[in-house]
Amino acid sequence: MSLLIKGGQVLDPINKRNGIFDVLIADGKIREIAPEISRELAYEVIDADGKLVVPGLVDMHVHLREPGREDEETIESGTFSAAKGGFTSVACMPNTEPPLDKGPLIEFVKEKALKVGSANVFPIGCVTKGRDGAELAEMAELYSAGAVAFSDDGNSIMRSEVMRRALEYSKIFNAPIIVHEEDKELAADGSMNEGYVSTRLGLKGIPKAAEEVMVARDIVLAQLTGGRLHIAHVTSAGSVDMIRDAKKKGIKVTAEVTPHHLVLTDEAVDGFDTNTKVSPPLRTSKDIEALIEGLKDGTIDTIATDHAPHTREEKETEYDIAPPGMIGLETAFPLVMTYLVRKGHLTVEEVISKMTIEPARILRLDKGTLTIGADADIAIIDPEKEVTLDVKNFASKSRNSPFHGWRLQGIIYMTILSGRVVYRS
Amino acid sequence: MRWKRKDLMGLEELEPWEIELVLDTAEACKGIFSRDIKKLPTLRGKTMVNIFYEPSTRTRTSFEVAGKWMSADVINVSVNTSSVRKGESLRDTLKTIQAVGADVVAIRHSAAGVPHMLGKMLDISVINAGDGAHEHPTQGLLDLLTIREKKGSFEGLKVAIVGDISHSRVAKSNIWGLKKLGAEVTVIGPSTLIPFGIEDMGVKVSYDLDEVIHEVDVVNVLRLQLERQRKGLFPTVREYSKLYGINRDRLKRAKEDLLILHPGPANLGIEITQDACDDPRAAITEQVTNGVAVRMAVLYLVLGGVSDNELIN
Amino acid sequence: MKSNLKEKTVIMDADGMRRALSRIAHEIIEENQGIEDVVLVGIRTRGAPLAQRLAENIERIEGRKIPVGILDITLYRDDLTTIARQPLVGKTEIPFDVTGTKLILVDDVLYTGRTIRAALDGVIDLGRPKRVQLAVLIDRGHRELPIRADYVGKNVPTSRKEVIVVELKEIDGDERVIIAEKAN
């Protein structure tokens, strides 16, 4: 089985390739990239004229909800959602039911993904048993079962001693501790950013300080221990500054930002649409400026979706008790293309790099490249085509997106996983 | 200009002329208060449902009286909040409203935005009877009506709102209304109870009541929720009362024609003393009367419609 | 005049209106054998100035003032619907007790009778008049209720497509009655 992608603009940041090339795929691997490859060599030829051919996107932060909440998402539906969004590799968070704090659970996810998945799935194991922030989980067992990183996800690790030991212990595997930075006391029962809008709407606010005090603490602990710290979904200008300083000092810290934190501000909460409730909350336009600056200068390494499916029943409720989170796999690329590239903040190469090789590096995955001999994980993008987002057409089992009805430019034309076409528009 | 809104969600969304229209209509409705027969046929055959997810005898009764004096069938649904599972209340409310075939719903809920969500889901009129710390539009309107009656106009009027601004929907609705009608508003309270960004609503902020009390025309005293102290937002009720309580001493330094308002029920001796309530400058009973008038006006406006007779003679 | 109306004929000018109101004033005095207990209540909007003019006429004849009030019937209408436009609620200003009076309701046009039905309800909620009579400037027919006027300025046969427009100087700046037709 061979596949020839003809005439597309091939963009492969790690190999510094950017030009019109043909790409030949055979046996699930990238066989050849050349200005002209004969059609006779391929079983199927894909005409990629006017399209971008890039490494399959990598999302290091998704929630697939399986096991436990298969009503919200399954490994099958979540990875198909990924494929529709151009993602060929996703790292899934361990806040399932039960949480992924034991080797066999990691193995279950991996095996299920191999069987029914439309994307590579890399599970993230728990830092602590039951994600309760008290005792370290058996990280070695998790790691050997296939966990690529450790995180307690939505549960910030409030006990500094536990966090210190986690950073130290994870050095054995050179795997990052991924943290959701939110001081539970400062955030209390808040449901949106604290500021003028929360005051206006009468919703309890979460101050930026709730994130920033934890970022500050964990940077200090990362310095103390030499462990690898990855800060999930950074939202505040203050956090960006601290991460920038930490990187300058050589502390092993990396960071991600979500498309929704780059596009929406707390003004979106006006109208009480619970799909705008996310954790951490949407901030302000000043923060967005700082986040974009952070992406540009490398302070923020990667764009990750924090794809968080919730059922309609869960979301159709009072704002202050609705569960936080929005789905993001199928909206990420068009949002990034429209709001970062078209607006001139980042080049398409920079964006592709932040969505492929950078997350692969953080998780030490052999992904995110179009190197000859690598797995043929490829996304073909139609950068000009406009689309009106319609949640009804999403592959995800859930519909919780505030971007329904938005008109965006740049869509996924085709997604190829190990040489197999898993999605065609 | 005619009222076109199906719902009343808050004063933030109202234009100044809409606020004036409610006040004018309320004033006309007050005409029946002095009659022996307090009954208008206006809403005959209409069903009004009052759903209160927070206990509030005062507001619920006021809505009930307003509906009954206009001949609506009024159904009170008091919800034992402890028996409603969190998150069930919205669906629960929808079912109740559909079951009784209501034409208008007045809803009180501890969560901001619930009336808003209901308004979007329902074709019938929804009146916000207070949602969390968001808005309490009928309270705001009755305060405005009381101020207009006593002061004539709002232009340049100096109004102080004293107390827990952070958690007060009454403060929010008052601020929007007063600013739209041209008054100057100062919010006064402990710094821990003044919310972020309140200045952006066009108000001045002060932590010192004594610095402001002598120069204001109206003081609206908010009810202090005593559980805020347990949450550590101020050290003791005693200290709060000392700094922000309205008492005889402070009133001595206030203007002779000061107007004192309180949404009730008051924590006597905490945010306001008994003798301050009894001061001739206080209009707390008028507020109760005006509450009924304003709610009648709002019911009429949200339920009102075309009259053929008006178009053709 | 409303922009969606097309003027057809003037059926009463300023002089005609003055003469009609003068005649009605005389008829009121005659019918009630004087003005003992007689009060006038104008129905908002155009009934109010008409009642005021009738009272002035009566005062000129009898040399004595009679009480005049204004009734707003908006809250008594039976046609409140959920469509967008609704009438503004005005104030009822009746500064006297109606119980025991010979109360004369005054309006500009009598048509279906529904306004008068609402006005009767409104008046009766205020007290118990000895007798209620009705004075109108124009009776255009097409009654939907068993109501008739005791005093009529002019009977004008109309079709339902037509509209009677009464203009008074106090409100409209002009002084005339016209028949108009709804333009489509």
Image (spheres, coloured by chain):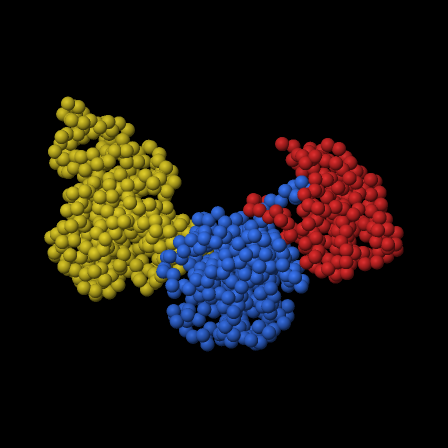
Chain colours: A yellow, B blue, C red
Residue at 31 percent across and 55 percent down: it is: A239
What x and y, as percent, mark residue B42?
A: 61, 53
Residue at 11 percent across and 53 percent down: it is: A144
Q: How many numbered discs?
A: 0
Taking the image as shown, residue B32 lies to the left or right of residue A398, namely: right
Give the quadrant of residue A252.
bottom left
Closer to the camera, A73 or A366? A73
Give the quadrant of residue A6.
top left
Taking the image as shown, residue B300 lies to the left or right of residue B196, namely: right
What x and y, as percent, mark residue B32?
A: 65, 60
Quadrant in the picture for the C terminus of chain C: top right
What x and y, as percent, mark residue B87?
A: 37, 57
Taking the image as shown, residue A222 lies to the left or right of residue B289, namely: left
Q: Is residue C125 visible to us here? A: yes
Residue at 13 percent across and 54 percent down: it is: A104
Residue at 33 percent across and 32 percent down: it is: A385
Closer to the camera, B174 or A186? B174
Taking the image as shown, residue A31 lies to the left or right of residue A238, namely: left
What x and y, as percent, mark residue B203?
A: 51, 59
Q: Is residue B113 visible to us here? A: no
Quadrant in the picture for the N terminus of chain C: top right
